[in-house]
Amino acid sequence: MIKTFSRKQRRVLSWWHRKSRDFDRDAIICDGSVRSGKTFCMSLSFVIWSFYFGGNGDFAICGKTIRSLRRNMITPITALLQSLGFSCEEKLSQNLLLVTYRGRTNRFYLFGGKDEASAALIQGMTLSGVLFDEVALMPRSFVEQALARCSVDGSRFWFNCNPEHPEHWFHLEWIKGAEQKNALYLHFTMDDNPSLSEEVKRRYESLYSGVFYERFVKGKWVAVHGAVYPFMADEKYYYGVPSGDFIRAVAVDPSAASFIEVIRRHGVFQVVPAQNNVVNGIRRVSQALKSGRIRICDTCKAARREFSLYRWDCERHADAPVKQNDHAMDDIRYFVTTLMDGGSFVPVIAAAR
């Protein structure tokens, strides 16, 4: 149950009101740390604004994927809206959320902006407003196509994200250019979320290190540099060899189609094409290692060697590690991103190419 909002959250909730000092803005941008309360208050504000704007309108809510959008935004917000007297009906097959209040209904179309082809999904629509959740993870073509759909008078843009590298197009054009875009820019930290206890804040701080600490805890748009897993120099992250277990599946680089087919033909192990988003995978591995959800044996020479050598590729001005000394790093990432689920997992082998 919500007891209070912070000053920044209240500003997000009211920036579109005629009495607000921000009323003349065309857009709002909220970035910053994880668990800072920006996503929840932004989604609530977006829906309430849609009824202040009018009724019987078409709006878009965009995420990296439809699945992540439902998990991070739609499910939490519909529960609160219903407690406030709104009626919500989600049509799953149409990726459509219908919200009704005092006899007026607005339609919220859900879109996933995961790649360049996603732009075609939103073409041809006429929208009164669009909300982007994790906009920094979406391709520019998708974002610009969605913005072009907002041709109704009074339509506004809503952007929410965690930081990426400082040369990212959204950082350069929208955050650094917020004034030129007539956008309200608000930077959030965990201190802007009054629902977080000091204990929870410390726990999140302990889960990140290096560039991910700077981005997800401090909320900074910083360039990657140095070791990918600097904390693995500490012996406390290595453990003795546990008793063996039955291997049930093999996770393989999805590009290694011939290897996948060989395993399938032998029929001994189940084979699973690995999820291969490198940066997101590194972040998840880092969290899993620091929290103890996965453990590296102190006798695993390949992994120990690569942890000490695995570096960000600072020359490319993008988020990517150097493609050297990374076979064990790829294996561990495949395991975490593909086969771990909520802290439990089946015994597996993770195979690089």
Image: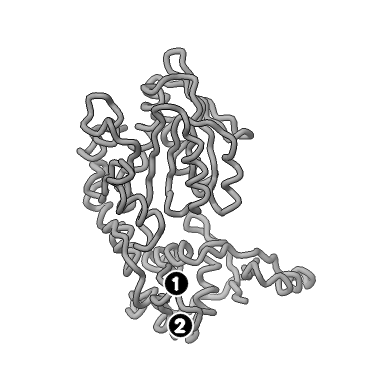
- Quarter occupied by residue 234: bottom left
Residue at the right extreme of this rendering: 265
Toward the top, the furthest residue is 103
Residue topped by disc 2? 306
Q: Nearer the viewer, residue 214 or 15?
A: 15
Crowding at dot 2, Cα within 10 Å, few <14 / some 14-19 / many 20+, comes out as some
Residue 183 point in image, percent of width and height: 31, 42
Residue 261's place in the image compared with 139, above or below, is: below
Rendered position, 169 above or below 335: above
Vertical comparison of 13 with 168: above or below: above
Residue at 44%, 86% (x, y): give it: 305
Q: Amino acid at mark 2?
A: Glu
Residue at 26%, 53% in the rendered image: 201
According to the picture, the residue beneath numbered tag 1 turns out to be 295
Q: Position of residue 220 (x, y in %)?
A: 29, 59
Q: Position of residue 140 (x, y in %)?
A: 48, 52
The location of residue 31, given as percent across then percent down, is 32, 49
* Residue at 25% from the left image edge and 32% from the top image edge: 3
Q: Amino acid at mark 1?
A: Arg
Whether residue 203 is visible here, answered yes or no, is no
Q: How is the image coloured?
A: one colour
**N-terminal of the two: label 2 or label 1?**
1
Secondary element type, mark 2: helix
Q: Neighbour class for label 1 at 10 Å: few (<14), some, many (≥20)?
A: some
**Near-viewer residue (198 or 210):** 210
